[in-house]
């Protein structure tokens, strides 16, 4: 979360550099230096969005260096604002203030000016280092949507046979001349991807397609890449039965891309999975849906998502809301990781503790797998920790390199920085707290969490938008009380 704090500091500094409070009474050369700071700060803004996803030690050290420079710059801006307020204070000054006011130009030249120059050089250095680090990290990386899905074992997926049947039935119900898009929606870790994979890998007689396309999405959503990947996969599978579409879409031809995709879908039956789609950009979601067209009766599209907004926009009918595993199935998932086999002969004491751990998972297979792996071949102390300690404490102690809540973190990384700050503020409330929505928005406003967007939207409207976004991501839920409508964290 350190990168979010740094991003908030960058945002605040950029706003302060635009205000007159910092520049009041300063010599012109200070204006030039302050204006020059905007260049590395804007570059740093872009870099921080990349560092947010990097869990390496190097990224953590780099983030700490960035924060140190930013905090020093904030302290200096505080002093500049104080000098300006003293020099322009309309009310009566004390004798001490007057002496300070008379001497402040000298102090500015002999003290603050060298500090500003030093901080400016440090800021340029950490910015250049960050840009170089991020460039090296991304060089040669394979885009996630093109990674092959290898080694899938459907028999290893526990407790989803009924759900698989239901999803297939819902897709087959649409026999009209229209596209069938079915969102599978649920909170992170429930196994939406695994369920979609079960359906995708089914090659039964009633489930035949000319070609199948699986696209794993990350935060860098690109309509052109999605469309060209569909065209590329279709070209491999149904050669000679699709139109020639070897165009260079990178030059920007959205209508031509949509036309080519729709022509392919019109001539072939296909099953397409858009896995892990999460976006709060309504225009992108609408354009993505339009990419498939409206009258592709042989095209079946599955969208897995944790966002109710995505499900509402993308779906052509009601979404499939995935629930948790049964307690028995959750225990099976846990036991296979913890013991190697749920029927393995183990100490009854460990079995009793293990069933309590599995019950803690609330039907979330990702948690059951993670905790089962955590206690595998470990002593009683680790088992008791898995049973009793808070999940965030377990993550710090036992998952230093791979997060226990990777699916939740993926959602966090895809939030824009203002929403991240609002989300992080929720940590002041105990888990499961009931919060009055209007009071929460007032607290966000008091902390100035979305000031820079004022003027475009009112503060109250922004608060409504942000709470809706958090509700859509299953981070908050609505609870009706006898007094008001509140939110539960």
Image (spheres, grey):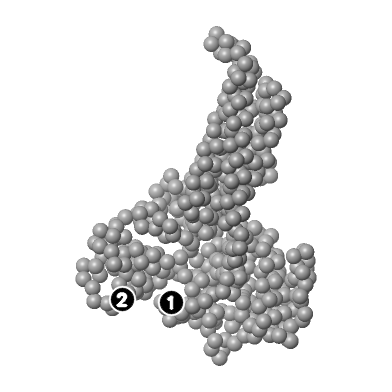
Q: Are the two marked residues, 2 and 1, in contact with CB atoms closer than 8 angstroms?
A: no
Q: Residue furthest bottom?
A: 205
Q: Residue furthest top?
A: 95
Q: Quadrant of residue 349?
A: bottom left
Q: Earlier in the sequence, mark 2 or mark 1?
A: 1
Q: Local crowd at mark 2 within 10 Å, few (<14), some, or many (≥20)?
A: some
Q: Quadrant of residue 450?
A: top right
Q: Position of residue 356 (x, y in %)?
A: 29, 65
- 353 up-or-down from 421: above or below: below
Residue located 43% across and 57% down the image: 401
**Where is mark 1, residue-wise?**
157
Q: Position of residue 380 (x, y in %)?
A: 24, 61
Residue located 69% across and 60% down the image: 283
Q: Position of residue 44 (x, y in %)?
A: 61, 45
- 133 up-or-down from 358: above or below: above
Classify residue 145 as left or right of residue 346: right
Q: Which mark is residue 342?
A: 2
Residue located 54% across and 86% down the image: 203
Q: Local crowd at mark 1 within 10 Å, few (<14), some, or many (≥20)?
A: some
Q: Is residue 12 visible?
A: no
Classify residue 458 as left or right of residue 332: right
Front one among 121 and 328: 121
Q: Secondary structure at mark 1?
A: loop
Q: Position of residue 76 (x, y in %)?
A: 57, 29
């Amino acid at each position: 979360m350190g990168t979010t704090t740094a991003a908030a500091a960058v945002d605040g500094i950029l706003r302060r550099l635009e205000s007159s409070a910092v520049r009041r009474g300063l010599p012109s050369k200070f204006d030039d230096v302050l204006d020059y700071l905007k260049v590395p700060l804007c570059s740093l803004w872009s870099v921080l969005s990349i560092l947010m996803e990097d869990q390496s030690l190097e990224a953590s050290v780099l983030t700490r260096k960035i924060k140190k420079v930013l905090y020093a710059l904030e302290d200096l801006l505080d002093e500049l604002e104080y000098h300006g307020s003293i020099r322009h204070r309309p009310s009566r000054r004390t004798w001490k203030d007057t002496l300070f006011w008379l001497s402040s130009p000298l102090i500015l030249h002999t003290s603050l000016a060298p500090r500003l120059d030093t901080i400016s050089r440090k800021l340029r250095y950490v910015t250049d280092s960050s840009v170089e680090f991020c460039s090296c990290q991304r060089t040669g990386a394979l885009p996630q949507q093109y990674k092959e899905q290898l080694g899938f074992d459907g028999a290893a997926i526990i407790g989803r046979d009924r759900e698989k049947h239901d999803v297939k039935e819902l897709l087959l119900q649409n026999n009209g001349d229209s596209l069938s898009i079915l969102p599978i929606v649920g909170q992170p870790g429930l196994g939406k991807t695994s369920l979609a994979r079960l359906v995708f890998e089914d090659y039964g007689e009633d489930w035949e397609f000319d070609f199948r396309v699986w696209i794993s999405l990350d935060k860098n959503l690109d309509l052109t890449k999605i469309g060209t990947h569909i065209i590329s996969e279709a070209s491999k599978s149904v050669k000679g039965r699709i139109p020639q579409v070897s165009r260079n879409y990178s030059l920007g031809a959205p209508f031509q891309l949509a036309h080519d995709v729709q022509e392919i879908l019109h001539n072939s039956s296909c099953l397409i999975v858009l896995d892990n789609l999460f976006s709060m950009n309504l225009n992108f979601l609408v354009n993505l849906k339009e990419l498939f067209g409206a009258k592709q009766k042989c095209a079946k599209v599955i969208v897995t998502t944790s966002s109710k907004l995505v499900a509402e926009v993308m779906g052509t009918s009601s979404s499939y809301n995935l629930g948790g595993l049964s307690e028995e199935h959750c225990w099976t998932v846990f036991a296979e990781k913890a013991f190697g086999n749920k029927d393995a002969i183990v100490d009854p004491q460990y079995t009793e503790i293990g069933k309590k751990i599995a019950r803690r998972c609330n039907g979330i297979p990702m948690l059951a797998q993670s905790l089962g792996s955590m206690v595998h071949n470990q002593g009683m102390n680790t088992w008791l920790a898995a049973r009793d300690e808070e999940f965030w404490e377990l993550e710090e102690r036992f998952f230093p390199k791979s997060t226990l809540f990777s699916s939740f973190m993926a959602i966090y990384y895809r939030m824009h920085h203002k929403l991240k700050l609002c989300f992080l503020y929720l940590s002041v409330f105990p888990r499961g707290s009931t919060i009055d929505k209007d009071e929460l928005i007032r607290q966000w406003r008091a902390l100035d969490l979305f000031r820079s967007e004022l003027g475009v939207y009112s503060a109250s409207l922004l608060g409504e938008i942000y709470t809706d976004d958090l509700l859509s991501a299953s981070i908050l839920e609505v609870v009706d009380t006898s007094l008001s409508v509140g939110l539960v964290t």
